[in-house]
Amino acid sequence: MGNGLHCAGVFIMKAIERDDIIFVITKEELQDEAMERIGRELTEEEVDIAIDAFEWGFRTMAVDVTYQTIFTEMIK
């Protein structure tokens, strides 16, 4: 939760660095989605296909839609 740490009951913000990771999807999260949507875990081959699909999707339309949503919220 957030970009910081708790110390003695106080939440301390940490500066975000240029190379910090902004978003991560773990294999566990992918498998949880698969169980929910198709009722089973993915094979290793299917995981590789999903990774390729995420990489393609994030490089194309998903990033544009996400950025548009983010920046629309920022200027409201």
Image (cartoon, rainbow, N blue to C red):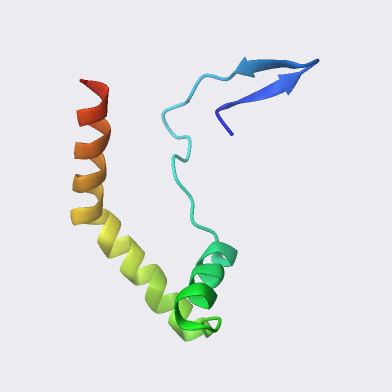
Q: Residue at x 55, y 62 (%)?
A: 29
- Asked whether, in this view, residue 41 is left or right of residue 65, the answer is right
Judging depth in this view, the residue of 2 and 37 nearest the camera is 37
The relative height of residue 24 versus residue 1 in the rendered view (above or below) is below
The relative height of residue 37 versus residue 2 in the rendered view (above or below) is below
Can you give x and y, in whole percent of width and height, for residue 70 in the image? 27, 34
Can you give x and y, in whole percent of width and height, for residue 8 in the image? 81, 15
Can you give x and y, in whole percent of width and height, for residue 42 in the image? 51, 82
- In the rendered image, which quarter contains the N terminus? top right
In the rendered picture of this protein, how many numbered marks are placed on residues? 0
Q: Residue at x 59, y 65 (%)?
A: 28
Judging depth in this view, the residue of 63 and 32 nearest the camera is 32
- In the rendered image, which quarter contains the C terminus? top left
Q: Residue at x 50, y 67 (%)?
A: 30
Judging depth in this view, the residue of 64 and 48 nearest the camera is 64
The relative height of residue 21 versus residue 5 in the rendered view (above or below) is below
- Asked whether, in this view, residue 24 is left or right of residue 60, the answer is right
Q: Residue at x 20, y 30 (%)?
A: 72
The picture quadrant where one finds residue 40 is bottom right
Can you give x and y, in whole percent of width and height, for residue 68 in the image? 19, 38
